[in-house]
Image: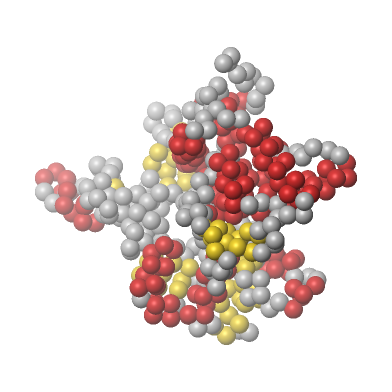
Amino acid sequence: MPGLDLSHLPLAQQKAIQELNIHPQQDEQLLWIAEHAMNVELPPDWVEFEDDDGNQAYYHAKTKRLTTEHPVIFKYKQFVDKVRKFQERMGTIGRKVKPHLAVIMNEVLNRIYRELPPVTPEIIERLAVLIYIDTTIEHDTTRRLKVAIESYAEDQYDIALQAQQKADMDTFLHEVRNEQIRLEVLNKPDAVIMCTEIEGQPARVKCEQCKDFFSLEGFAATHATGKRKNHTTVKCEQTTCSVYPDQLATCEVDNTLFCDKAYEEVAQRQPHIRQKRKKVLGGLSCSEYPATVAEVLCEDCSDLYCWEAFIELHRRGNRLRHVPLRLDAEGQLYRAGELLPPEECARLIDRARLAREGGPWLAFQDDQLNTYWYHLSDKVTTQQNPYL
């Protein structure tokens, strides 16, 4: 294949292509990732400075992590590696996206023309392979893909009908890829720093002389004698799960930290834990404005909003009668000024998060317009609503 001419691309994108180790010839279908990586901002708590050799370096004030690589570019690299492995697994290396997407889009538009539901599980699975989404584990992204293709296909069908124009796929691709970057890069938390001495333990301190990270036990074991006995440490601040120490905690119950997975597993074995107050760490985001913290939960919508979004969406129709429950900084709900019981509070918030982020079950309609649910991991269907 002749060399791909990149001279027409912005210099920032050419630089990103080099930083992400994207090979223009064999990775032509990944150039869009470099386009997103052209202008990256430093996340909160990170500081940029020049080291003694005049090179750019980055320091995280809480964890004490020090690196010469931009932390967001590092996540972009991880995403590129993930996509490459997915391509190898699916045998899609070098496959051009747009021609195959056109075939699927045409199939979806034909279904709309025949007054059938736009998509089926089989269509979503084919589309996901094309756009590098692993449906067995990326449930949230798959759910958003389904919503995007349905709404976009409806719009394109109207345009095709009225203006006799072919479906434009660039806008759809742009929307889906923006969502992938948001979930896989921009909103992805930093990995937990683990102890270099004791496997499976998260780091709690960084040795200022060794420059290594240790758990308290790991530091004690390696610095009990000799010259190391005089080494000093700085605190490595990480809020980790008590069940899965390599995962960041998302909630706290009875002074015990859990990630979402651990909380659900413990609650299944010990149902009484749901009766205890559950503190959500880091706050909950608004459904309409993800960068904004949620301030209310609409019980009727089963969704989380900031006040601005709630007012905007509840100005007319039946939604005018919806009553918001106030949400405080610790994830506690108030109805008419009174704090809700812990179990009801946790149930309402968990239901709202599940409705928004979804589990492995995804709802479809068959050709007779009957609703059924498809399990993204197990690839089975049921007519019974698994979320009730």
At x 27%, y 53%, the residue is 200
Q: Is residue 115 visible?
A: yes
At x 59%, y 52%, the residue is 121
Residue 49 horizontal/vertical position (percent): 46, 38
Q: Quadrant of the N terminus?
A: top right
Residue 197 horizontal/vertical position (percent): 22, 48
Position of residue 315 in the picture relative to residue 256 (left or right) = right
At x 33%, y 63%, the residue is 243
Q: Quadrant of the C terminus?
A: bottom right
Residue 220 horizontal/vertical position (percent): 18, 54
Q: Is residue 356 visible?
A: no
Q: Quadrant of residue 264?
A: bottom left
Q: Is residue 184 depicted above or below 235 in this figure?
A: above
Q: Is residue 120 depicted above or below 265 in this figure?
A: above
Position of residue 367 in the picture relative to residue 4 (left or right) = right
Residue closer to the observer: 145 or 119: 119
Total numbered labels: 0
Position of residue 160 in the picture relative to residue 230 (left or right) = right
At x 54%, y 64%, the residue is 382
Position of residue 227 in the picture relative to residue 352 (left or right) = left
Q: Quadrant of residue 321?
A: bottom right
Residue 52 horizontal/vertical position (percent): 38, 31
Residue closer to the observer: 344 or 224: 344
Q: Is residue 79 depicted above or below 328 in this figure?
A: above
